[in-house]
Amino acid sequence: MGNYIVLTNKDTFQTILENEGLQVVETYDFYFFEKLKAKYTIAKVIDENIKIQLFEEYEGKEYVNHIAVKFFERFETIEAAREELNEIVKASGNSEDSIHSKLVKTAEAVL
Protein backbone atom coordinates (compact mmCIF):
# COMPACT_ATOMS: atom_id res chain seq x y z
CA MET A 1 0.00 0.00 0.00
CA GLY A 2 1.33 3.42 -0.93
CA ASN A 3 2.27 6.17 1.46
CA TYR A 4 0.76 9.13 -0.44
CA ILE A 5 -2.78 10.31 -1.12
CA VAL A 6 -4.27 13.20 -3.10
CA LEU A 7 -6.87 15.33 -1.34
CA THR A 8 -9.26 17.74 -3.05
CA ASN A 9 -10.77 21.06 -2.00
CA LYS A 10 -13.43 22.85 -4.05
CA ASP A 11 -15.96 25.58 -3.33
CA THR A 12 -18.59 23.17 -2.03
CA PHE A 13 -16.32 20.31 -0.96
CA GLN A 14 -13.63 20.80 1.68
CA THR A 15 -11.10 18.28 2.94
CA ILE A 16 -9.55 19.08 6.32
CA LEU A 17 -5.78 18.95 5.94
CA GLU A 18 -4.96 19.48 9.61
CA ASN A 19 -4.67 15.90 10.79
CA GLU A 20 -1.97 14.43 13.05
CA GLY A 21 -1.86 11.34 10.83
CA LEU A 22 -1.04 13.30 7.66
CA GLN A 23 1.94 15.30 6.50
CA VAL A 24 1.16 17.78 3.73
CA VAL A 25 3.79 17.51 0.98
CA GLU A 26 2.60 19.81 -1.84
CA THR A 27 -0.45 21.84 -2.76
CA TYR A 28 -1.55 22.81 -6.27
CA ASP A 29 -4.21 25.13 -7.66
CA PHE A 30 -6.08 23.79 -10.67
CA TYR A 31 -7.25 26.41 -13.16
CA PHE A 32 -9.63 25.86 -16.05
CA PHE A 33 -10.08 28.81 -18.42
CA GLU A 34 -8.19 30.94 -15.85
CA LYS A 35 -10.78 30.18 -13.15
CA LEU A 36 -9.68 28.40 -9.97
CA LYS A 37 -11.64 25.13 -9.93
CA ALA A 38 -9.93 23.14 -7.17
CA LYS A 39 -6.95 22.81 -4.86
CA TYR A 40 -5.18 19.47 -4.74
CA THR A 41 -2.89 18.45 -1.91
CA ILE A 42 -0.48 15.54 -1.88
CA ALA A 43 -0.13 14.23 1.66
CA LYS A 44 1.96 11.51 3.23
CA VAL A 45 0.02 9.09 5.44
CA ILE A 46 1.78 8.76 8.77
CA ASP A 47 -0.95 6.88 10.67
CA GLU A 48 -2.90 4.14 8.87
CA ASN A 49 -5.78 4.39 11.36
CA ILE A 50 -6.77 7.99 10.73
CA LYS A 51 -9.98 9.28 9.25
CA ILE A 52 -10.13 12.18 6.83
CA GLN A 53 -12.78 14.83 7.53
CA LEU A 54 -14.79 16.02 4.54
CA PHE A 55 -17.26 18.90 4.60
CA GLU A 56 -19.74 19.32 1.79
CA GLU A 57 -22.39 21.92 1.15
CA TYR A 58 -25.23 20.72 -1.04
CA GLU A 59 -28.58 22.42 -1.68
CA GLY A 60 -28.12 24.67 1.35
CA LYS A 61 -27.28 21.84 3.74
CA GLU A 62 -23.91 20.99 5.24
CA TYR A 63 -22.64 17.45 5.57
CA VAL A 64 -19.63 16.13 7.48
CA ASN A 65 -18.08 12.76 6.72
CA HIS A 66 -15.19 10.96 8.39
CA ILE A 67 -13.65 8.53 5.91
CA ALA A 68 -10.96 6.02 6.83
CA VAL A 69 -7.73 6.65 4.96
CA LYS A 70 -7.79 3.05 3.69
CA PHE A 71 -10.56 4.06 1.24
CA PHE A 72 -8.40 6.67 -0.51
CA GLU A 73 -6.41 5.85 -3.64
CA ARG A 74 -2.78 5.43 -2.61
CA PHE A 75 0.47 6.13 -4.41
CA GLU A 76 3.90 4.64 -3.70
CA THR A 77 5.79 7.85 -4.43
CA ILE A 78 5.26 11.60 -4.62
CA GLU A 79 6.04 11.35 -8.33
CA ALA A 80 3.19 8.86 -8.82
CA ALA A 81 0.80 11.25 -7.04
CA ARG A 82 1.99 14.08 -9.30
CA GLU A 83 1.33 11.91 -12.35
CA GLU A 84 -2.23 11.40 -11.11
CA LEU A 85 -2.69 15.16 -10.83
CA ASN A 86 -1.45 15.61 -14.38
CA GLU A 87 -3.99 13.01 -15.54
CA ILE A 88 -6.74 14.97 -13.76
CA VAL A 89 -5.70 18.10 -15.67
CA LYS A 90 -5.68 16.22 -18.98
CA ALA A 91 -9.11 14.74 -18.28
CA SER A 92 -10.63 18.10 -17.35
CA GLY A 93 -11.94 18.77 -20.82
CA ASN A 94 -11.80 17.70 -24.42
CA SER A 95 -8.56 18.08 -26.38
CA GLU A 96 -9.46 21.63 -27.44
CA ASP A 97 -10.02 22.69 -23.82
CA SER A 98 -6.88 21.03 -22.46
CA ILE A 99 -4.79 24.05 -23.41
CA HIS A 100 -6.92 26.03 -20.98
CA SER A 101 -6.17 23.71 -18.04
CA LYS A 102 -3.21 24.27 -15.77
CA LEU A 103 -1.86 23.11 -12.45
CA VAL A 104 0.16 25.60 -10.37
CA LYS A 105 2.18 24.56 -7.32
CA THR A 106 1.31 26.89 -4.45
CA ALA A 107 3.01 25.26 -1.48
CA GLU A 108 5.67 22.71 -0.74
CA ALA A 109 6.61 21.26 2.64
CA VAL A 110 10.17 20.62 3.68
CA LEU A 111 10.51 16.88 4.23
Image: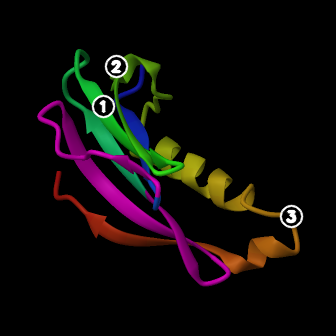
Magenta-tinted stretch: 12-39
Q: CA distance from mark 2 to mark 3?
A: 33 Å
Q: Is residue 90 magenta?
A: no
Give the residue drawn at x 46%, y 28%: 74
Q: Which residue matches tag 3?
A: 94
Give above or below for 47 relative to 99. above
Given contact means CB atoms under 8 Å apart, are the residues at marks 2 and 1 in contact?
A: yes
Q: Is residue 44 left or right of residue 5?
A: left
Give the residue drawn at x 71%, y 79%: 100
Identify the amino acid type marked 1.
Answer: Ile
Q: Secondary structure at mark 3?
A: loop
Q: Secondary structure at mark 2?
A: strand
Q: Earlier in the sequence, mark 2 or mark 3?
A: 2
Q: Nearer the viewer, residue 45 or 9?
A: 9
Residue 38's spot in the image, x, y percent? 50, 62
Count of numbered circles on the image: 3
Can you tell which quarter of the image residue 16 is in? top left
Q: CA distance from mark 3 to mark 1?
A: 32 Å
Q: Earlier in the sequence, mark 3 or mark 1?
A: 1
Q: Which residue matches tag 2?
A: 68
How packed mark 2 is, by other alpha carbons closer than 10 Å (few <14, some 14-19, many 20 or more), is few
Q: Quadrant of the N terminus?
A: top left
Identify the amino acid type marked 3.
Answer: Asn
How packed mark 1 is, by other alpha carbons closer than 10 Å (few <14, some 14-19, many 20 or more), is many
Give above or below for 107 relative to 7. below
Q: Which residue matches tag 1?
A: 52
